Image (cartoon, rainbow, N blue to C red):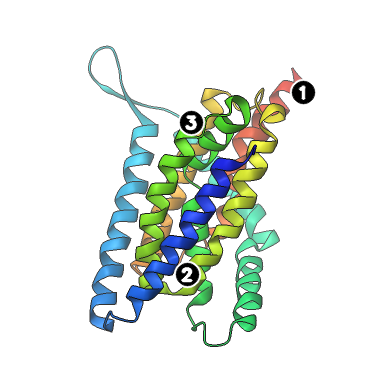
């Protein structure tokens, strides 16, 4: 099966979410609150560390150099404008509400769990690199490693946010599976620099997810999603005009 890694990833998200839902009934609101705070801090650290490691590098003289900061800012601004025009977040919320209406008693935070988990599982570098790796070489090691991390996250997310997390497995399968199937076509465009730039933007969005979880500020992370793909578009345009 060409998309075996993505299928396994989706299945373990479902299994982890089911386990989390079982735990959810045994957690008081007090414990749910502290777990959410711990989860938010963890997501912020993941996003921050990924962002800083992508931006900064050690020069030959031992000093720190930065790269891609201006390009990152341009991608985020332009991508946010595109995403706001399309209103990606509203469409994700409407899809979540559609599913919720089919599942009586699923809880009022269904949409929050679905959107938050979907974004976290899709915008990271492992989703892109692992899917490409499977499509180009047939190796699924990266996606299997991601599956373990996502399973753990889905347990915690669903224990605090509910069943909406379980349904994030669907966009994860579609997103990663599409990259795997299109890997041969995308390979010339996804140079190490492009992947690095996409990962940088993705890590900034992960940082935004953490801020949302902690309710520090409501950031429309979903509407910033187009920013992740702008490095590919830029590279393609540059090839066409040169």
Seen as rendered, the residue at the extreme top is 60
Residue where numbered disc 1 is placed: 240
Q: Residue at image x 27%, y 69%? A: 35
Circle on res. 196: 3
Is mark 3 in CB contact (under 8 Å) with mark 1? Answer: no
Question: Residue placed at 30% from the left, 17% from the top?
Answer: 59
> If you read the primary sequence from the N terminus, does the residue marked by circle 2 or circle 1 appear first?
2
- Marked residue nearer the N-terminal end (3 or 1): 3
Nearer to the camera, 218 or 40: 40
Q: Give the camera-side residue of 138 and 204.
A: 138
- Within 10 Å of the Cα at label 1, are there few (<14), some (14-19), or many (20+) other Cα atoms? few
x and y percent of residue 184 in the render? Answer: 69, 27
- The disc at residue 220 is none
- In what quadrant of the picture does the C terminus appear? top right
Q: Are marks 2 and 3 in contact (CB under 8 Å)?
A: no
User: Whole-percent x and y of residue 58?
Assistant: 29, 21
Residue at image x 48%, y 31%? 196
Mark with earlier residue (2, 3): 2
- Which residue ends up furthest to the front in the rendered image? 1
Q: Quadrant of residue 49?
A: top left
Q: For the residues marked 3 and 1, what is the alpha-carbon distance in whole angstroms?
A: 21 Å
Q: CA distance from mark 2 to mark 1?
A: 41 Å
Left or right position of 62 against 194: left
Q: Secondary structure at mark 3?
A: helix
Q: Which disc number belongs to residue 113? A: 2
The quadrant the N terminus occupies is top right
- Residue 193, image x, y percentages: 52, 25
């Amino acid at each position: 099966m060409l998309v075996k890694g993505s299928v396994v990833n989706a299945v373990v998200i479902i299994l982890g979410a089911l386990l989390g839902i079982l735990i959810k009934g045994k957690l008081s609101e007090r414990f749910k609150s502290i777990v959410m705070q711990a989860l938010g801090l963890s997501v912020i650290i993941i996003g921050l560390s990924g962002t800083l490691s992508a931006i900064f590098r050690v020069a030959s003289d031992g000093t720190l150099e930065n790269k891609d900061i201006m390009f990152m800012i341009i991608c985020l601004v332009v991508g946010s404008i595109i995403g706001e025009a399309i209103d990606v977040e509203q469409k994700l919320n409407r899809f979540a509400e559609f599913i919720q209406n089919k599942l009586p008693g699923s809880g009022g935070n269904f949409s929050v769990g679905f959107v938050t988990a979907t974004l976290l599982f899709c915008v990271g570098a492992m989703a892109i690199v692992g899917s490409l790796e499977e499509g180009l070489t047939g190796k699924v090691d990266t996606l299997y490693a991601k599956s373990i991390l996502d399973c753990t996250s889905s347990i915690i997310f669903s224990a605090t946010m509910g069943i909406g997390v379980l349904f994030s497995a669907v966009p994860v399968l579609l997103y990663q599976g599409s990259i795997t199937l299109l890997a041969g076509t995308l390979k010339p465009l996804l140079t190490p620099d492009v992947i690095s730039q996409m990962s940088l933007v993705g890590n900034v969005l992960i940082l935004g997810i953490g801020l949302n979880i902690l309710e520090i500020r409501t950031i429309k992370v979903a509407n910033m999603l187009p920013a992740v793909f702008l490095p590919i578009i830029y590279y393609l345009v540059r090839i066409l005009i040169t």
